[in-house]
Amino acid sequence: MNTILVGAQWGDEGKGKIIDVLTEQADIVVRTQGGNNAGHTVYLGPKKYVLHLIPSGILRPGKVCVIGNGVVIDPIGLVAEIDGLEKLGVAVSPDNLRLSETAHVVFPWHRELDAQREVRKGQGKIGTTKRGIGPTYGDKAARVGLRVIDLLNGARFPDRLRERLSENNEVLKALGAAPIDYDSLLRDYTTAANRLRPYVANTVLYLHESTRRGANILFEGAQGTFLDIDHGTYPYVTSSNTTSGGACTGSGVPPNRMDRVVGVMKAYTTRVGEGPLPSENAVISDLLHGLGREFGATTGRARRCGWFDAVVTRHACMVNGLDELAITNIDGLDTVTTIRVCIGYRLDDQILHHVPADIEVFSRCEAVYEEFPGWLTPTHTLSRWEDLPVNCRHYLLSIAQLTGARLTVASVGPAREQTLFV
Ligand code: IMP
């Protein structure tokens, strides 16, 4: 059984935890897009792990994790992540981690360009994670990127690096930023390359051979549907395909080898960075931030919060082909008397039931709500679906129905035990 898992909103849906739960039934877990802009938080007993590039399957003995061709890799960040896991007692070796030889590499000029472009955009900034993701995918599309296979080639890499750096240093100088030193860059990247060499593989062949052997593969999405470069709220998006199709192109496993698509969504809506969010609401934001929730795992930024938006999740259901839904962070709404759900957008004198493509039009949309009675009972201690308060079950089944897929998992807290199967 091959499963694609995606975020149905703007990222941070709690995918890390659901991936961890689904990993139990998987032999291989694959990341297929994005880079270390992602941050998956997983709690194991008292320990908290934040993973950026390595699939969270690494925490489970016997599972193989793959970083696929669609991912962009900061090699120094990846080495630091491997070292960090080992310090926490998690064994990482070529037996349980494989890195695609054709994944593109993030360089410091990508990060610097990311930061410079944001500064220049001023008010219109995207609010990126400044990890160089956009410029790295930009180089990939412009066919001037360097891949892992280039990084490992000691005969070729120094010249390719010099060539790319000299062009980018010109750009950095023109933008008033400091140029990057070649010698230290070559040294640092060569050191990282030597550390990563044993992990590098032809992951496309590996995944196909594993499929033939009957392995179960979980394709873990990073970010969320509305950060997708094609289907998201462009230009306030990331630079990869975060929707289910990205799992195929980012791994080399074709659509007819996929068995199901699971969408993860919060019981409310959050977004980090700029861009429209019609159901944004100060009361729910203050409530969640007051509980110490909704601060980003990668940048620590406070996330913007709002009511559940069923217009966006219905769109997510359509473009991802969602079969099943996992709803997370249900306990965040435990103290809310009346819960609102956005079911349409008011635009001048019309009511829209779809997400408008034009960002200026979307920015003018006002949410139209339906109200649901809250359950006003703590849910974080409950471990069975049947034990959830009636109003809570009604709310969850209603938002699943509005979205258009079958609810299979309800999550009432960060721990594995706080997962209820419907
Ligand atoms: P970038 O991916 O760093 O270029 O950022 C582009 C947009 O995607 C910004 O709004 C970021 O806040 C958002 N973003 C990127 N990665 C994540 C993530 O893992 N969770 C939530 N938002 C993200």
Image (cartoon, rainbow, N blue to C red):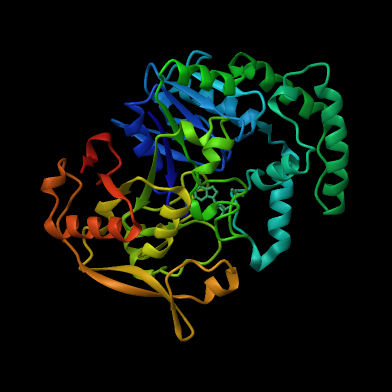
- Judging depth in this view, the residue of 66 and 191 nearest the camera is 66
Q: Residue at x 82, y 54 (%)?
A: 175
Q: Residue at x 23, y 56 (%)?
A: 397
Q: Quadrant of residue 375?
A: bottom left
| Relative vertical location of residue 296 with respect to residue 248 in this rendering, above or below | below
Query: Residue 54: x, y in percent?
Result: 50, 29
Residue with the most extreme bottom position = 349
- Relative side of 274 to 263, left or right: right
**Quadrant (top left/top right/bottom left/bottom right) for the C terminus:** top left
| Relative vertical location of residue 81 with respect to residue 325 in this rendering, above or below | above
Query: Residue 377: x, y in percent?
Result: 14, 57
Q: Residue at x 73, y 21 (%)?
A: 190
Query: Residue 113: x, y in percent?
Result: 74, 48
Q: Residue at x 46, y 48 (%)?
A: 320
Residue with the most extreme front position = 256
| Relative vertical location of residue 95 with respect to residue 267 in this rendering, above or below | above
- Judging depth in this view, the residue of 382 and 258 nearest the camera is 258
- Judging depth in this view, the residue of 181 and 379 nearest the camera is 379
- Relative side of 157 to 94, left or right: right
Query: Residue 268: x, y in percent?
Result: 34, 59
